[in-house]
Amino acid sequence: MKKIAVVGSINIDQTITSERIPLKGETLPGRNLRYIPGGKGANQAVAMAKLGAQVEMFGCVGDDENGRKMIENLANNNVETHNIKIVSDIPTGIAIITVGENDNTIIVLEGANGQVTRAYIDSIKDTLFTYDMVVLQHEIPLDTVHYIVELCAEHNIPTLLNPAPAAEVPMETIEKVTYLTPNEHEAVLIFGKDRSTEDLLKAYPEKLIITQGSRGVSVGLANGEVLNVPARKAEVVDTTGAGDTLNGAFCVKIIEGSSIAEALEYANAAASLSIGKFGAQSGMPTAEELAKALEETK
Ligand code: RIB
């Protein structure tokens, strides 16, 4: 069975629900304060494992209760964790999330995720090179992300970079990465606002995948066409982690040998199911749940 590695963030999410997201300077009453597993890296690893993939998580947590709980959660979801580094004197990453009106705001305290350095990568790279695909996001130092893309390209290991949260991506990294999956805002930051989405997708066929929220997800195909997979109708409880589910599910299908179109169809359906439950990880579907949902819409 092919194996996928995620090198990324591991956070505990402190979530609070309100009738809507507060405006600047506004105070609103909240309800349901929760502490639940999160972090874009960990979320993507869990999304893939729930869909039956063999996954290892690489990253750092603090030597604290949150860190231990987050590792335990990954392990409970069948994600391999033994190369996660526990660092002293720096807390596990925390995300402060407000959920309201079908949307959210997130502030991330980097914590131990900042220790995912080139030195850490050098310490695990021999293991990393045994993987069939490496998945990255922007919640660890960007220098490390670009370093991993370069190393993987040298070793012919396909990579997916989900450039979230938004930050610039060097042209060299764009060239070397196999899949780049920004949302529309991230795409503007990376490529500038002068180029249309269609133009960009045609310029990077089968590499650039742009997610467009309720309008679905688009990719340029090798034959020059642009494929849009429309979003599926779904009951929205919490959109946190929908992008992570989409990225994870996409990798699971790609690694199995599916076409980009098939993988995006599957990923889109997985993301739509994930928003039906509260929290980044709890709504992520299993392979059986997703197969059933796809069958029902046929
Ligand atoms: O993508 C959702 C994730 O972003 C949350 O789980 C939170 O930890 C932040 O990293």
Image (cartoon, grey):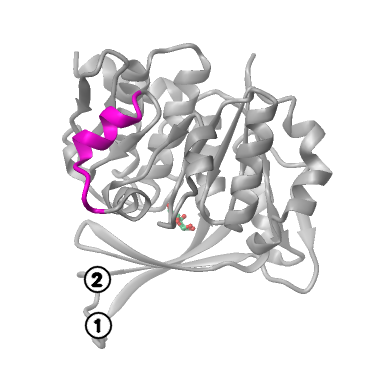
Confirm whether the magenta stretch covers residue 49: no
Q: Is residue 28 left or right of residue 67?
A: left
User: Foreground residue, 271 or 68?
Assistant: 271
Q: Amino acid at mark 2?
A: Ile
The answer for how far apart the CA atoms under marks 2 and 1 are is 10 Å
- x and y percent of residue 62 in the render? 72, 64
Looking at the image, which residue is at 22% across and 56% down? 102
Looking at the image, which residue is at 62% across and 55% down? 143
| Residue receiving disc 1 | 24
| Residue receiving disc 2 | 21
Residue 167, disc = none
Magenta-highlighted residues? 193-205
* One can see residue 115 in this view: yes
- x and y percent of residue 24 in the render? 25, 83
Considering only vertical position in the picture, is 88 above or below 139?
below
SS category of the residue bearing label 2: loop
Considering only vertical position in the picture, is 221 above or below 172?
above
User: Foreground residue, 290 or 8?
Assistant: 8
